[in-house]
Each structure stands twice: as C-alpha cells, then as structure tokens.
Amino acid sequence: MKILAIETSSKICSVAILEDNVLIKEKTINDDNTHSIKLMPLIEKIFNETNLKIGDIDLFCSDKGPGSFTGIRIGIATIKAFIDVTQKNGIGISSLEALAYNVKKEGIICSLIDAKNDNVYAGLFEHKEGKYIQIDEFKTDNIINILNEYINKEKSIIFVGDGLISYKNYIIEKFGNNAIFEENNELNATNIGIAAYNKIKNNKEETFSLTPLYLRKSNAERMLEEKNNGNKNL
C-alpha cells in the first residue's frame, strides 16, 4: 500500500510517501505561514523524485489537528481533493497521536502542543509492543490543570511536543525525576503515514474521519463572541 501523508498543523510543512509503514521519501519545509504557497510544489517535487504519480497512491492522509486552524484546513482540503480525483481512501490523524510516534521507548506518553498563554492541547498514549494506544480523551486546558490531572493517573510519563519545550519547568516541578523528556518534538508527515497505516491495518471495516479536530474555538471566533457579548451588555 502506497501512502501519501501531509503535515501542515504546525510551522512544519511536511510531505511523505510510504510503502505500508516504511518511508520511501519525505520532504520538509520549516517556514511558518507559507503552507498555502509551498504545499503543492512540495508534493509535486516528492512525486518527481520518487517517479510516482497521484494515481499510484492507495491511501491519502493528513494531520487533522489540533494545531494551526489555517494549516489544518489546507492539509485536509488538499487530501480531499486528491480523494475526489482518485476515488481512493483517506484518513485524518491527530497531531497528538503523530507526536506520540516520536517516542520509541515503551511507556505512558503525554503529547503536548503549546496553545499559548499557559494553555496546551494534550493526549495520553501507551506505547507497548510496538502499538500506540490512546488511553484518555484529548484535552485542552491550562498546563497546570493538565499536569495535576495526569500526576494523579500516572507515576512516570514520557513527554513530547512543543508544549514540553514551552512548559518544561512546570513539568519538572510537578513530576521531578518521574518525567522523561523526548528529544524529537517536531511533527512530521512520516508519523502521520505510519499511524494511518496502522489504523487501516487494524480496523479494516471502520470508516475514518477527515473532519478537523480543533478542541477549542479559533481566536477570531472567541474575539467575535466577546464582541457580541459586549454589545449585549450595552
């Protein structure tokens, strides 16, 4: 099974082609806010370098969030366009799940994405015998609230993601030596592809969603609500 995977939910714009769960080629640009301009040329380049074309792909997958609202929409819209053209299958993978695949050690993994102002997106996974199993619902909250909840559930946790980088001092304060820190904290298309392959392989009859996973409203939506609430109070 040939897989085209796209990662656009962060400042990373990444595209990968895999054969099942084995990487054939990955191309990455670390250039914030240019996904709408650079994604399609990156896809064209990776097809040229692998001597493949869109019709050779069996499964299309993209990061569905949480993360950049604009980036998520760009990635999912691109994948949906490919699905419409080829009539092949597609699947969305959470960025929190993709981050967990950065961790090669077995154990409990906490994926953290910085949502700014001491807030994070968070997900808990267990990595055991090569499988990454989600063990708690995805959350968005203040980092202290998240850590207080998790410290009551798990003694030792492997942390991964840019939320680890932003709030490492908080994690150390709460978990001390029971916190393990992953060195690779960037999202990438390869992990999106591997996670997609694993889901398809293990759940052949299931229909998978390409609906964006935002977890919270965008800044624009929150500002509009605040403005409308302010007008009601006049």
Image (tube, rainbow, N blue to C red):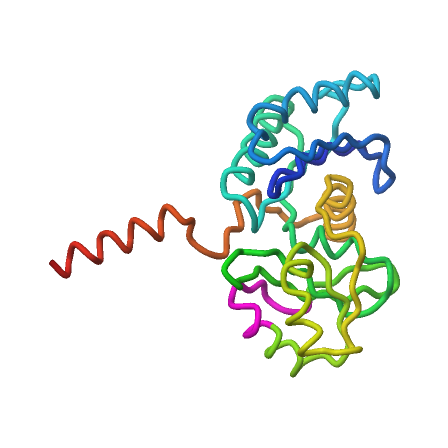
Please report the bounds of the magenta region as a residue range: 135-146
Residue 143 drawn in magenta: yes
For the N terminus, give its image quadrant. top right
Total labels: the figure holds 0
Q: Nearer the viewer, residue 108 or 208?
A: 108
Q: Is residue 137 above or below residue 56?
A: below
Q: Position of residue 234 (x, y in %)?
A: 11, 58
Q: Nearer the viewer, residue 61 or 43?
A: 43
Q: Is residue 226 left or right of residue 117?
A: left
Residue at the image position 60 percent from the left and 21 percent from the top: 85
Q: Position of residue 102 (x, y in %)?
A: 79, 53
Residue at the image position 54 percent from the left and 56 percent from the top: 115
Q: Position of residue 146 (x, y in %)?
A: 58, 72
Q: Is residue 3 left or right of residue 150?
A: right
Q: Is residue 100 above or below residue 192?
A: below
Q: Position of residue 226 (x, y in %)?
A: 28, 55
Residue farthest left in this picture: 234
Quarter of the image where one finds residue 168? bottom right
Residue 31 drawn in magenta: no
Quarter of the image where one finds residue 86? top right
Q: Is residue 48 above or below residue 221?
A: above
Residue farthest front in this picture: 169
Residue at the image position 51 percent from the left and 66 percent from the top: 141
Q: Nearer the viewer, residue 86 or 131?
A: 131
